[in-house]
Amino acid sequence: MGVLDGKVVIVTGGGNGIGKECALTAGREGASVLVNDLGGGLRGDDAGSAGPAEVVAQQIRAAGGKAISNSDSVSDYDAVVAMVEQAKKEFGGLHAIINPAGILRDGMFHKMTPDDWKAVIDVHLHGAFNVCRASVEHFREQQNGSYVLFTSTSGLIGNIGQANYAAAKLGVMGLSRVVAMEGQSKNVRSNIIAPFAWTRMIESIPVKDEAGAQRVERIRQNMRADQVAQFAVALCADGAKDVSGQIFSVRGNEIFLFNQPRPVRALARLEGWTPDTILEHYLPATRASFTDLGATTAVFPWEPV
């Protein structure tokens, strides 16, 4: 018996990395899985291939599970609608979507091209909208459904050279929150995961110094895609039916619950504010509560467990 027995799950980006491990884990836990992957390169600018998704589907079937493949892009709304219908037709329903599909077009913001900005937003943010919008009416009608969307510490905390990726991933946070709020009365859940894992996305990050090389090596050795997949699959299970609207992170054997933006310091002035009084009083009074510009390593300075 698995935690997803009788469930039908779509996993996007399922041909490689975290998506692949999510698909395999869902299959082992009893789900019927539609494995989606465009089969393209990391930048998302080539023709793609049906091969990676089908290979993973074959692995699930070889292990005694049920799986089919799909090679459409999550950035194409009509294609995602067809993907949802494919899962429902083949397996008789749909209960969860795990959506780690993604690309990277890294570069310093002052050098970023409009095409590189748009391509990343299309896949990550528009893709998250597409998979949710294409299935949410079905989930609401059956009063059961779970989204596991993927954010990133690049958006939650920040990362130099990834303005497009950070903007998209922080947008996913807002999308997931509202989907969860609107779906609460219909048992439609949405949560997000910020993963730490060795994937081809991490492998593509340029290493500029010895400290960077050591950090990348720690990720490769201690933070695996299958560790993230265990948590993603658990969020789709009935045992997590009261978990929604949350932000999690998985780093090796550590699982973190993130807080969400809330006021941290307030100051009122009964006679109102002027630019001068803001500069003289408000900013000095609140400066100690500012969030610094440190990257992920400043927030997670210890070795992964």
Image (spheres, rainbow, N blue to C red):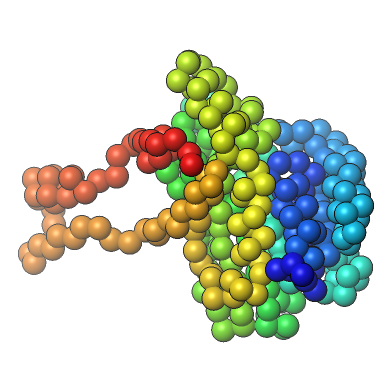
* Left or right: 93 as drawn, with respect to 196: right
* The one of 191 and 76 positioned closer to us in this rendering: 191
Residue 241 location in percent, x, y?
59, 75
* Number of numbered discs: 0
* The one of 149 and 74 positioned closer to us in this rendering: 149
Residue 7 location in percent, x, y?
77, 71
Residue 205 higher or lower than 234, as above or below:
above
Residue 97 location in percent, x, y?
71, 62
* The one of 115 and 134 positioned closer to us in this rendering: 134
- Which residue lies most toward the top here? 209
The residue positioned 67% from the left and 60% from the top of the image is 233
Residue 61 location in percent, x, y?
91, 55
The answer to whether residue 40 is seen in the rendering is yes
Residue 217 higher or lower than 59, as above or below:
above
The residue positioned 48% from the left and 15% from the top of the image is 209
The answer to whether residue 275 is seen in the rendering is no
The residue positioned 75% from the left and 63% from the top of the image is 29
The residue positioned 64% from the left and 55% from the top of the image is 230
* Left or right: 119 as drawn, with respect to 175: right
Q: Quadrant of the N terminus?
A: bottom right
- Which residue lies most toward the front here? 1
* Left or right: 257 as drawn, with respect to 183: left
Residue 216 higher or lower than 247, as above or below:
above
Please tell me in which quadrant of the rendered image residue 98 appears: bottom right
